[in-house]
Image (cartoon, rainbow, N blue to C red):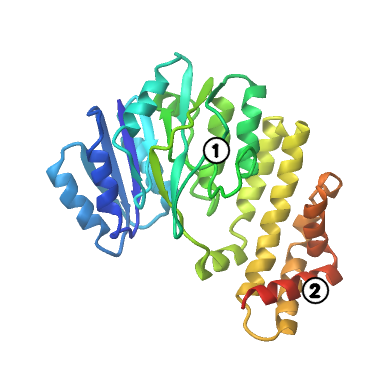
């Protein structure tokens, strides 16, 4: 009934717990496809040992090609009626697959079942509620709240949220539906592949069920120097461009609240580049200011495409910090202080 796909890369600390949680499921009719993406630690060996003891588990290996390629290879091998993605550092409750599968049977036209999670942070466990209640989305109007949270993770969420509906896990996708619409993860996108995959999936789905059920245990990673270094490379730019294409293709840029959220998303992502530039610069505040202003200059062509007229006031201030040199300097000085 269900093909579970796990893209694996260097998770020797957590992969056994992940696989054990799946082996303990209350339902039995599933397969687990582990795609090792060229791990350099013992992850693949641990997964191989597990698969040797349970015929429902299969390990595939590939040279390192990225998480999108690994997920797509899992899709190529899947045989279940439904596809489910699990990340190798996460785990699931024993009734997880059964609960999502039961929800899929409530209506014949359901193509996607979605649920929420318990976030595992340094401060403990935080039960997430992506939306205040369970619901089914059929129409374009029903789906607007889903698109809104894809663009703005805070939409309809309470304070303290750490993730949002754009993730690939916590869901079942009807496999025939994915094949019919050729829905795949784009290896050309270094960031936000999962969010944009879901944007396409939500558009094409006949019906989508959201369950306020938290059977998935998501391990939250913190901001690191690597995160800042990836941000400063402009790795979000291809995703921003793809978002623009889909917004226009689906007519979402004609929905005022979605159009505004899209403009805000661009400003926030570009501002993160200023922050990354500040965090990665050693030296005086004056040196930080020079580097941040230079980063703002490289973004001029992109920030010029933002529709500032629809930005709410707090975001308008960020926008001014991106486009006005004097404001950029003030932003740099503030960001420099955050390094200490």
- Using the image, determine if residue 331 lies above or below residue 127: below
Query: Residue 305 appears at what percent x and percent y?
Result: 79, 51
Q: Residue at x 35, y 36 (%)?
A: 76
The answer to whether one can see residue 78 in this image is no
Answer with the quarter of the image where residue 299 lies. Answer: bottom right
Q: For this view, does 122 lie left or right of residue 288?
A: left
Furthest toward the bottom, the residue is 284
Q: Quadrant of residue 130?
A: top right
Cα distance in 3D space between marks 1 and 2:
37 Å
Query: Residue drawn 65% across and 40% down?
Result: 155
Q: In the rendered image of this protein, does residue 247 appear above or below residue 290?
A: above
Q: Which residue is mark 1?
A: 130
Q: Whole-percent x and y of residue 113? A: 45, 28
Q: Nearer the viewer, residue 294 or 98?
A: 98
Q: Who's the residue at 79% across and 54% down the image?
A: 314
On the picture, is 94 further left or further right than 68? left
Q: Which of pointers 1 and 2 lies earlier in the amino acid sequence?
A: 1
Quick check: 108 above or below 44? above
**Residue labelled with disc 2:** 329
Examine the image and state in which quarter residue 253 appears: top right
């Amino acid at each position: 009934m269900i093909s579970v796909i796990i893209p694996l890369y260097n998770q020797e600390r957590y992969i056994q717990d992940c696989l054990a949680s799946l082996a303990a499921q209350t339902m039995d009719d599933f397969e687990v496809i582990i795609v090792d993406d060229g791990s350099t630690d013992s992850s693949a060996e641990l997964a191989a040992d597990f698969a040797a003891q349970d015929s429902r588990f299969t390990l595939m290996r590939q040279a390192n090609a990225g998480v999108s390629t690994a997920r797509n290879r899992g899709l190529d091998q899947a045989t279940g009626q439904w596809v489910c993605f699990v990340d190798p550092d996460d785990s699931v409750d024993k009734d997880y697959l059964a609960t999502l599968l039961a929800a899929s049977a409530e209506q014949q036209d359901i193509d996607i079942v979605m649920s929420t999670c318990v976030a595992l942070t340094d401060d403990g466990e935080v039960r997430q509620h992506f939306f205040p209640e369970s619901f089914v989305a059929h129409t374009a109007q029903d789906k607007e709240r889903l698109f809104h949270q894809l663009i703005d993770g805070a939409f309809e969420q309470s304070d303290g949220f750490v993730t949002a509906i754009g993730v690939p896990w916590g869901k079942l996708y009807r496999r025939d539906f994915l094949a019919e619409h050729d829905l795949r993860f784009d290896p050309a996108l270094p960031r936000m592949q999962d969010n944009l995959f879901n944007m396409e999936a939500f558009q094409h789905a006949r019906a989508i069920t959201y369950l306020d059920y938290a059977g998935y245990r998501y391990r939250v990673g913190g901001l690191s120097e690597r995160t800042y270094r990836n941000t400063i490379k402009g790795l979000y730019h291809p995703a921003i461009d793809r978002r623009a294409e889909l917004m226009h293709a689906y007519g979402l840029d004609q929905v005022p609240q979605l159009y505004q959220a899209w403009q805000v998303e661009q400003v926030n992502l570009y501002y993160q580049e200023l922050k990354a530039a500040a965090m990665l610069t050693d030296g005086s505040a004056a040196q930080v200011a020079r580097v941040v202003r230079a980063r703002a200059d490289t973004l001029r062509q992109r920030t010029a495409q933002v529709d500032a007229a629809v930005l709410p006031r707090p975001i308008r201030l960020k926008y001014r910090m991106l486009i006005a040199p004097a404001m950029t300097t003030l932003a740099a000085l503030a960001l420099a202080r955050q390094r200490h």
